[in-house]
Image (cartoon, helix red, strand yellow):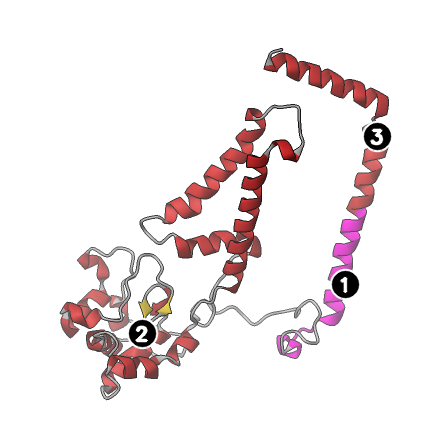
């Protein structure tokens, strides 16, 4: 019997089974769907009522950790797009993809990790029912598929957990590491270098770069722990930071505007040419840990 004949015979058996033991969609299945829909709506309405009755208009009244607000405050603090003390994160169901960005680094393999692998798995899941048309549906007869599915679920669960607990360095936390940097790099007695290290921490440079193990290492940004050994000098580093595109770096943003137009960081400081020079002095003094 050919595969097509087997499918036709299987379909006929299915139709016969429906006639003998099946139930029509209306009213049986429709009744079940209606009941379940009402349950979902009632749960949502109930949660909304609990949130409204237990929340407060002042978000500060829900501290600490929403102790007096079961489902969170009614309003949050106004958003500050210029803050460096908040790290945006995706929804929980994207944590596995979020963590893949840490495994597959920019720019060499990030497309493979974030687009290639998920797309391949999705294509396999869509095509598999058309490839495997055997009548036998017992899991014991499909060991490869079962093992592959279990491994995928475990992998996604592990990546989701790692993405949920992954810690991003906040600017306020990075600043606390400046004295340690100064001691390890040997520029503790250089106030301009220490000032530049503070600018480096407050400006959120560790969102992409790493320095003595602190930072994100995103977008292919290099580790700057030993940047001073490259011989660029203070003037060269100042020029590079001001406009990296002149040196072929089109990923790093330009900071030339800081020298002419006042800009505000999270602490409210004005970043100008003096801060850029201090940042360059700090990088030039970074010769690697002593």
Query: Is residue 268 left or right of 250 when viewed as pictured?
Result: right
**Rendered image quadrant of residue 61:** bottom right
Name, please, the residue furthest toward the bottom.
189
Q: In this rendering, which labeled residue sits more in front, label 1 or label 2?
A: 2
Q: Is residue 9 above or below residue 200?
A: above
User: Which residue is denoted by mark 1 in the rendering?
Assistant: 49
Q: Earlier in the sequence, mark 3 or mark 1?
A: 3
**29 and 1: which is toward the camera:** 1
User: Which residue is denoted by mark 3 in the rendering?
Assistant: 26
Tell me where the magenta segment starts and ends, as one range: 38-62
Q: Earlier in the sequence, mark 2 or mark 3?
A: 3
- For the residues labelled 3 and 1, say whether their Cβ atoms are less than 8 Å apart: no
Q: Residue at x 43, y 47 (%)?
A: 114
Query: Is residue 44 left or right of 60 when viewed as pictured?
Result: right
Q: Is residue 268 above or below residue 165?
A: below
Residue 21 drawn in magenta: no
Q: Is residue 92 above or below residue 282?
A: above
Q: Residue at x 41, y 74 (%)?
A: 171
User: Which residue is denoted by mark 2 in the rendering?
Assistant: 200
The quarter of the picture where the C terminus appears is bottom left
Q: Percent from the top left, x then y, of residue 160? A: 54, 55
* C-alpha gap between disc 3 and disc 1: 34 Å
């Amino acid at each position: 019997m050919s595969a097509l004949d087997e499918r036709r015979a299987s379909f006929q058996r299915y139709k016969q089974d429906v006639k003998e033991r099946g139930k029509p969609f209306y009213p049986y299945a429709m009744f079940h769907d209606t009941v379940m829909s009402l349950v979902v709506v009632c749960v949502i309405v109930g949660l909304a009522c609990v949130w409204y009755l237990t929340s407060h208009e002042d978000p500060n009244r829900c501290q600490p950790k929403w102790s007096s607000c079961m489902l969170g405050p009614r309003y949050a603090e106004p958003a500050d797009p210029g803050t460096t003390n908040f790290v945006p994160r995706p929804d929980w169901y994207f944590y596995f993809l979020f963590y893949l960005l840490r495994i597959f680094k920019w720019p060499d393999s990030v497309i493979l990790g974030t687009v290639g692998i998920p797309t391949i798995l999705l294509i396999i899941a869509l095509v598999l029912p058309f490839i495997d048309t055997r009548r036998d549906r017992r899991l014991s007869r499909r060991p490869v598929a079962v093992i592959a599915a279990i491994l995928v679920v475990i992998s996604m669960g592990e990546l989701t957990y790692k993405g949920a607990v992954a810690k991003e360095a906040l600017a306020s936390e990075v600043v606390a590491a400046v004295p340690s940097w100064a001691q390890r790099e040997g520029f503790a007695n250089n106030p301009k270098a220490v000032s530049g290290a503070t600018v480096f921490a407050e400006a959120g440079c560790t969102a992409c770069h790493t320095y003595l193990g602190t930072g994100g290492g995103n977008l292919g940004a290099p580790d700057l722990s030993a940047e001073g050994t490259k011989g660029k000098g203070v003037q060269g580093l100042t020029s590079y930071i001001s406009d990296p595109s002149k040196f072929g770096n089109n990923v790093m943003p330009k900071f030339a505007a800081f020298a002419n137009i006042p800009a505000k960081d999270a602490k409210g400081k004005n970043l100008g040419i003096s801060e850029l020079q201090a940042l360059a002095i700090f990088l030039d003094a970074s010769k690697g840990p002593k």
